[in-house]
Image (cartoon, rainbow, N blue to C red):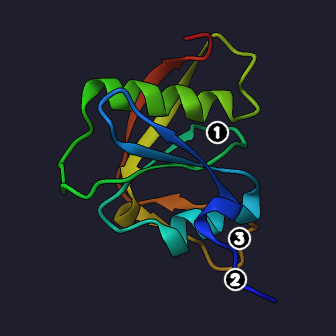
Amino acid sequence: MTRPSEDDVARRFTSPDGMEVLVGRTARDNDALTFQFASQRDFWLHVAGCPGSHVIVRNPEWLSSLPRETLRFAAVLAARHSKARSAGQVSVHVAQVKDVTKPKGAPPGQVSLKRYRSVRASVGS
């Protein structure tokens, strides 16, 4: 079996600030995206407490935080690619990939976060 490519596991977007944003397609793809393709310095987003896509924002400049418009854009993508897509507002966890771990024996797509912050996203935005 051949190893999937980044394009096999993620949809690709460009943020208003020109940053590359990747959105996982399935739970298994989320694992591959987060743990095989993402860099430790990239940003990771996911809707809090709800199944959905892992969203990775590439961070080649080693920024300590995301620009406001990119953060908003990526949070809305996380909300729209989750089971909470019909909700008005959702909470989205934001972390660096280095703070995302896979618990032993956890099902595909499930992770633990060492450090994160939460932002609100309007799904209709």
The kind of residue tagged 3 is Ala
Helix or strand or loop: what does disc 3 sit on?
loop
Residue 103, percent from left and from top: 60, 72
The one nearer the camera, 80 or 46, is 80
Residue occupying image coordinates x 41% and y 46%? 20
The mark tally for this picture is 3
Residue occupying image coordinates x 50% and y 70%? 37
Give the foreground label among 1 and 2.
2
Q: Which mark is residue 49?
A: 1
Residue occupying image coordinates x 36% and y 31%? 71
Q: Which residue is mark 3?
A: 106
Does the CB distance between marks 1 and 2 fall below 8 Å? Answer: no
Helix or strand or loop: what does disc 1 sit on?
loop
Q: Earlier in the sequence, mark 1 or mark 2?
A: 2
Examine the rendered structure and indicate whether residue 81 appears above or below residue 54. Answer: above
Q: Which residue is mark 2?
A: 3
Residue 73, percent from left and from top: 45, 27
Does the CB distance between marks 3 and 1 fall below 8 Å? Answer: no
Mark 3 to mark 2: distance in Å?
21 Å
Farthest residue toward the bottom? 1
Label 2: how many Cα within 10 Å (few below 14, some 14–19, many 20+)? few
Q: Quick one: quadrant of the N terminus?
A: bottom right
Label 3: how many Cα within 10 Å (few below 14, some 14–19, many 20+)? few
Residue 100, percent from left and from top: 45, 62
Residue occupying image coordinates x 71% and y 78%? 105
Q: Is residue 68 visible?
A: yes
Left or right of 86 in this view: 63: left
Q: Is residue 109 visible?
A: no
The kind of residue tagged 2 is Arg
Examine the rendered structure and indicate whether residue 51 appears above or below residue 15. Answer: below
Mark 1 to mark 2: distance in Å?
30 Å
